[in-house]
Image (tube, rainbow, N blue to C red):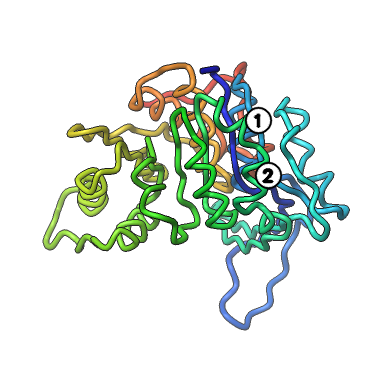
C-alpha cells in the first residue's frame, strides 16, 4: 500500500461575491468581487492535501467550457495528479459564493460536469482508488459514484458527508473517520434512523454535539470527527471521545475552511498519524484558511507557519 491520497469528488469554478450583509428574501444589494476562483469540495480537499506535501490523485470531472481552466488552475499548480480527471460535454460545476463583512458565507452549487461522476465513471479510476492508502469522499457527486468509490477502497476511507445525501448505510459504516459538522451529524443520524434529541437543560458547551458523536460511534461508525468551527472538533475513535481545540484567528472568509481541514487530516492519516493528532493538525490548517479570501487561494503550503492553539 502506497501513501497516496485519492480524492473522489467535485471540481467547481467559484464565482466570488462580497457584500456587507446577506440580502433578505426579495432584496437587492450592491456587492463587489465577481472573480472566478477554483473550488468544489473535492478539488478543495485535493489542493489542501497536495500543498501540505501529500501525493494526491484527483478523480473527478470538468466541462468543456471556459470555466474548466480556472476550476483546475490550483490543482495543477499544487501538483495534483489529474490523469483520472474526465472532460464531460457541457458546463463545469459552478458555485456562487456570497461572503459578508463578518466572513460568513452562503453558497449555491450547480453540479454541471460533477453529475457525470456516477459508478461507471468512478470505476474507470479503480486502480488509483484501490492502491491509495487514503480515499476521500464528499457529497457533491452522484450517490452511485460515492458508493462505488467506497466499495473500491482498500485503504482508509475518509467520508466528509457534505452536503448530506442519502447513501447506502455501508458507506457511513466504512468511514474511518466520518467527518461532519453539527448540522451534517444530525442529518446523518436521520439517515441511519436514529436521530438524537437535543439535550434538555444542558449547561455544558456542545452537549448536543457530544451526544451526536457518541450515537454515531454507538451505531457502528468506526471513527468520527465532528467539526465545531472556531471551537475545533470532537474526535471519537472506539470508546474514546476527546476534543481538539482550534487556534483563535481573525476570520476574513470561512469559505473552504472545512475542506482545508479534511485535506490536512488526510495527509496526516496517510503518514500514519493518530486520528486525534491528525485532527489537531487539521484544526490549525482550517484556522489558517480563514485568514484570507477564497477557498483554495487561502490554503497553506507545508512551508507556511500555522497558528498555534492558546
Helix, strand or loop status at disc 1: strand
Q: CB under 8 Å between callouts 2 and 1? A: no
Q: Position of residue 72 (x, y in %)?
A: 77, 40
Q: Position of residue 248 (x, y in %)?
A: 42, 35
Q: Which mark is residue 60?
A: 2
Q: How many labels were placed on the picture?
A: 2
Q: Position of residue 159 (x, y in %)?
A: 45, 43
> Which residue is depicted at the point 22% across and 60% down?
196
Q: Nearer the viewer, residue 7 or 297?
A: 7
Q: Dot 1 surroundings within 10 Å: few (below 14), some, or many (20 or more)?
A: many
Q: Which mark is residue 57?
A: 1
Q: Nearer the viewer, residue 187 or 127?
A: 127
Q: Quadrant of residue 244?
A: top left
> Which residue is depicted at the point 77% across and 28% down?
77
Residue found farthest to the bottom: 26
Marks 2 and 1 sit apart, C-alpha to C-alpha, by 10 Å
Question: In screen coordinates, is 118 left or right of 3?
Answer: right
Quarter of the image where the C terminus is located: top left
> Which residue is depicted at the point 59% across and 58% down?
100
Q: Position of residue 192 (x, y in %)?
A: 30, 58
> Is 24 above or below relative to 226?
below
Q: Quadrant of residue 302?
A: top right
Q: Dot 2 surroundings within 10 Å: few (below 14), some, or many (20 or more)?
A: many
> Is 55 above or below relative to 129?
above
> Which residue is depicted at the point 82% across and 52% down?
67
Q: Which mark is residue 23?
A: none
Helix, strand or loop status at disc 2: strand
Amino acid at each position: 500500500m502506497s501513501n497516496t491520497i485519492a480524492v473522489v469528488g467535485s471540481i467547481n469554478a467559484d464565482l466570488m461575491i462580497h457584500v456587507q450583509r446577506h440580502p433578505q428574501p426579495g432584496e437587492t444589494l450592491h456587492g463587489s468581487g465577481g472573480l472566478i476562483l477554483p473550488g468544489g469540495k473535492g478539488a478543495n480537499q485535493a489542493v489542501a492535501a497536495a500543498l501540505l506535501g501529500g501525493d494526491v490523485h484527483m478523480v473527478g470531472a470538468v466541462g468543456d467550457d471556459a470555466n474548466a481552466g480556472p476550476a483546475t488552475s490550483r490543482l495543477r499548480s499544487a501538483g495534483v495528479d489529474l490523469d483520472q480527471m474526465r472532460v464531460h460535454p457541457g458546463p463545469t460545476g459552478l458555485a456562487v459564493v456570497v461572503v459578508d463583512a463578518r466572513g460568513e458565507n452562503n453558497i449555491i452549487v450547480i453540479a454541471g460536469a460533477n453529475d457525470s461522476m456516477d459508478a461507471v465513471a468512478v470505476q474507470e479510476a479503480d486502480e488509483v482508488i484501490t492502491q491509495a492508502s487514503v480515499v476521500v469522499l464528499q457529497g457533491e457527486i452522484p450517490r452511485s459514484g460515492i458508493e462505488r468509490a467506497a466499495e473500491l477502497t482498500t485503504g482508509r476511507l475518509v467520508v466528509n458527508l457534505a452536503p448530506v445525501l442519502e447513501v447506502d448505510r455501508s458507506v457511513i459504516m466504512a468511514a474511518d473517520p466520518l467527518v461532519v459538522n453539527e448540522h451534517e451529524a444530525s442529518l446523518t443520524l436521520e439517515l441511519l434512523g436514529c436521530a438524537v434529541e437535543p439535550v434538555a437543560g444542558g449547561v455544558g458547551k456542545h452537549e448536543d454535539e457530544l451526544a451526536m458523536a457518541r450515537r454515531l460511534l454507538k451505531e457502528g461508525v468506526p471513527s468520527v470527527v465532528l467539526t465545531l468551527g472556531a471551537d475545533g472538533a470532537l474526535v471519537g475513535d472506539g470508546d474514546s471521545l476527546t476534543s481538539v481545540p482550534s487556534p483563535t484567528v481573525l476570520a476574513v472568509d470561512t469559505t473552504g475552511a472545512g475542506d482545508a481541514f479534511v485535506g490536512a487530516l488526510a495527509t496526516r492519516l496517510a503518514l500514519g498519524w493518530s486520528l486525534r493528532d491528525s485532527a489537531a493538525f487539521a484544526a490549525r490548517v482550517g484556522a489558517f484558511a480563514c485568514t484570507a479570501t477564497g477557498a483554495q487561494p487561502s490554503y497553506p503550503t507545508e512551508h507556511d507557519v500555522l497558528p498555534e492553539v492558546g
